[in-house]
Amino acid sequence: MERNGLPDRMREAKIGRWVLGVCGFLLVSFFLAPMTLDEGSVGPLQGRANAIDYFSEDGFGSHGNQATNEGAADGQCCPAFAWSEVNFYAAIIYGFGDVNCHQKSERSWEVNNNQLPVCTRDVGIFAGLFIGGVVFSRRGWNRWTVRDTCLSLLPESMLHGVYAKNQRTMLWLACGMLLCVPLIADGFLQLLTSYESTNLKRVLTGVPFGFGLGILLCSMFAARAEAFFGAGQVLLPGEARFTLARNGRQESE
């Protein structure tokens, strides 16, 4: 029997492997895709987050290239780029980056003299997502709720007092805030002041945020109350037990 009261944790391991596999594929592809294109054919890009800017050179989704053409009139050398016209693999990865990232050249790395599909902050976030999937595949347990499934990664000895005093929500939120604060502080200081972050800082602050996001994502899929015969079957730290209150909420005793 596993430490959550179930006979095995095969489903949790499978979910963790799915997250680490998908995020690991994207993370590696961010560096491989530029290598499949002609040297110096991508960048500098200046797009918008959550918008399509580089689908074509002058038609639908060409906002980034319109800005490039205006710059070229001033003597700047910025070749037009359309991810719909490159090989299928690179098109998928650069299209993903186009939709999800601002792709600002000064906040991005280059490989093969081509700008990466996403900025360094996103590289850090996906590295964190990958690490989160790895950790959850090895240490995550379904414990009925998303909150308790997230907390299952922490050492049992650390959680005895937390469960005895029913302070799970406070600890869960505190862990989440701790992982988010570096990215939020770095990003908002840059937005609201004259402070300018560096690409290394963007990666380092993106990793803990991505790690927390990865654990939360895994827990959302892994937490299944129906896997148990009842709330009392869930094994919790410090021999705590769930009881179903009259209003339907789960609380530990």
Image (tube, grey):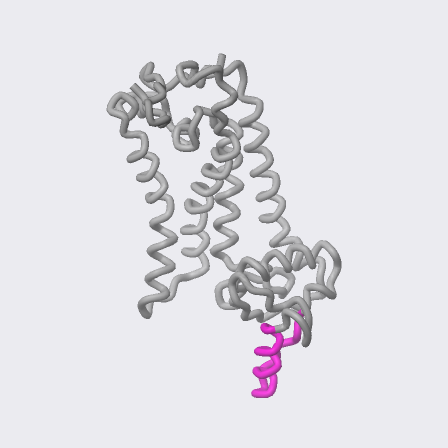
Q: Is residue 76 visible?
A: yes
- Nearest the viewer among 71 and 226 is 226
Identify the residue at the far bottom of this view.
74
On the image, the x and y values in percent for residue 106 come to 49, 68
Query: Relative to residue 103, is residue 231 depicted above or below?
Result: above
Which of these two is toward me, 180 or 219?
219
Up-down relation of residue 143 to residue 129 (above or below): above
Quadrant placement of the C terminus: top left
> Could one spot residue 116 in this view of the protein?
no
In this image, 164 relative to 129: left or right? left
Range of magenta residues: 63-81
* Quarter of the image where one finds residue 3: top left
Image height of 29 relative to 84, above or below: above
Q: Answer whether residue 52 is magenta in the image.
A: no
State the residue lying farthest toward the front: 246
Give how far across and how far down residue 175 sits, in percent: 34, 38
Which residue is the extreme one toward the top? 1
Image point (51%, 43%), residue name? 129
Residue at the spot 35% in from the left edge and 51% down from the top edge = 182
Residue 67 placed where, x, y %? 57, 78
Residue at 61% across / 39% down in the picture? 21
Q: Where in the figure is residue 51, as x and y percent of width and height? A: 56, 64
Q: Is residue 80 magenta?
A: yes
Viewed as shown, does residue 82 lie left or right of 99? right
